[in-house]
Amino acid sequence: METCPRCQSDNVRPFGRGDLFLLLLVLAGIFVWIGFYERYLWIVSVTLIIISPVAFVFPLRFRCKDCKHIWKAGKAKTPAH
Ligand SMILES: [Zn+2]
């Protein structure tokens, strides 16, 4: 299990590509919904859908719940795999 390189806590959470991808799609969905009332917000929704694959380019990160430190996977003592 990954531990925080700053405070050595194991109370860490993957801050990953899938999360970011889902977040972008959920936001896009929300803007589609709002877009029924405010048409210009469709542009925001389309933009979010277009950029959502960018989430998979981002390196996997971890976030410490104790000290809020965010770091890239593989920098800690124990590799992710
Ligand atoms: Zn920490």
Image (tube, grey):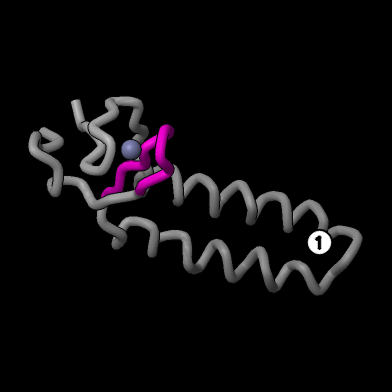
Q: Which residue is mark 1?
A: 35
Q: Residue at x 15, y 36 (%)?
A: 80
Observer-nearest residue: 18 or 66? Answer: 66
SS state under label 1: helix
* Within-10-Å neighbours for mark 1: few <14, some 14–19, many 20+: some
Residue 65, percent across and down? 43, 34
The C terminus is located in which quarter?
top left
Q: Work out whether residue 9 or residue 41 is closer to the camera in this orientation and state it.
A: 9
Furthest-front residue in view? 7
Q: Main secondary structure of the magenta part?
A: loop
Q: Is residue 7 above or below residue 33?
A: above
Compared with 5, 24 (above or below) is below
Q: Which residue is at a point 9% across and 34% down the rendered structure image? A: 78
Range drawn in magenta: 60-69
In which quarter of the view is residue 10 placed? top left
Across and down, in percent, residue 43 comes to 69, 73
Q: Position of residue 44 (x, y in %)?
A: 67, 69
